[in-house]
Image (cartoon, rainbow, N blue to C red):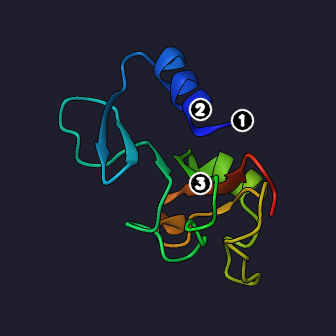
C-alpha cells in the first residue's frame, strides 16, 4: 500500500479528522484545538531520525492508541527490547512518544 492509499483511507474512514501537511509529512488532528495529532504519516527525515526514511518509497505510519491496545500490540513497551525502527512491517512503540501510547510501523512499496 502506498502513501496515497493510506492517506485516502484515513480521510475516507475518519472524515472528522482535519489534516495539515508540513514539509511533506501528514498530520491528522481530532477536534478544533489541533494540539496533538492522532495519526501522522512521515515520508522523510524532517521529523524522524530513527527509521531511515531517506530510502526510496519508505514511510512511517504513527497512530495514537488506547493504553489497552498499546500493551497488546507494541512489544518492548517496558524497555526490555530495543526495537529496530528501520525494520519493515513491525508494529512498535513510537521511538519518542511510545510512553504516550503511540505505535508506529515502517512501510515500503518495495522492500530494499
Q: Which mark is residue 6?
A: 2
Residue 84's spot in the image, x, y percent? Answer: 73, 76
Q: Which mark is residue 32?
A: none
Residue at x 36% of width, y 18% of height = 16
Q: In the drawing, does residue 93 fall left or right of residue 101?
A: right
Helix or strand or loop: what does disc 1 sit on? loop
**Residue occupied by mark 3:** 59
Helix or strand or loop: what does disc 2 sit on? helix
Q: CA distance from mark 3 to mark 2?
A: 11 Å
Q: In the drawing, does residue 111 fall left or right of residue 70?
A: right
Tell me where residue 50 sits by quadrant.
Answer: bottom right
Neighbours of disc 1 within 10 Å: few (<14), some (14-19), many (20+)? few
**Residue occupied by mark 1:** 1
Give the mark, 3 or 2, whose residue is nearer the N terminus.
Answer: 2
Q: CA distance from mark 1 to mark 2?
A: 7 Å
CB-based contact (under 8 Å), mark 1 and mark 2: yes
Q: In the drawing, does residue 75 fall left or right of residue 51?
A: right
Residue 94's spot in the image, x, y percent? Answer: 56, 64
Give the mark, 1 or 2, whose residue is nearer the N terminus.
Answer: 1
Q: Is residue 82 depicted above or below 45 in this figure?
A: below
Q: Is residue 97 depicted above or below 30 in this figure?
A: below
Neighbours of disc 2 within 10 Å: few (<14), some (14-19), many (20+)? few
Tell me where residue 66 sits by quadrant.
Answer: top right
Quadrant for the C terminus, please: bottom right
Residue at x 73% of width, y 46% of height = 109
Tell me where residue 83 sits by quadrant.
Answer: bottom right
CB-based contact (under 8 Å), mark 3 and mark 2: no
Residue at x 36% of width, y 45% of height = 37
Q: CA distance from mark 3 to mark 1?
A: 11 Å
Residue 80's spot in the image, x, y percent? Answer: 75, 84
Amino acid at each position: 500500500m502506498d502513501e496515497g492509499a493510506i492517506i485516502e483511507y484515513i480521510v475516507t474512514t475518519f472524515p472528522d479528522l482535519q489534516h495539515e501537511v508540513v514539509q511533506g509529512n501528514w498530520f491528522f488532528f481530532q477536534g478544533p484545538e489541533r494540539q496533538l495529532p492522532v495519526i501522522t504519516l512521515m515520508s522523510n527525515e524532517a521529523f524522524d531520525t530513527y527509521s531511515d526514511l531517506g530510502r526510496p518509497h519508505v514511510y512511517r505510519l504513527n497512530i495514537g492508541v488506547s493504553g489497552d491496545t498499546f500493551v497488546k500490540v507494541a512489544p518492548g513497551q517496558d524497555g526490555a527490547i530495543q526495537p529496530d525502527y528501520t525494520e519493515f512491517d513491525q508494529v512498535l512503540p513510537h521511538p519518542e512518544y511510545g510512553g504516550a501510547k503511540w505505535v508506529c510501523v515502517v512501510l515500503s512499496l518495495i522492500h530494499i
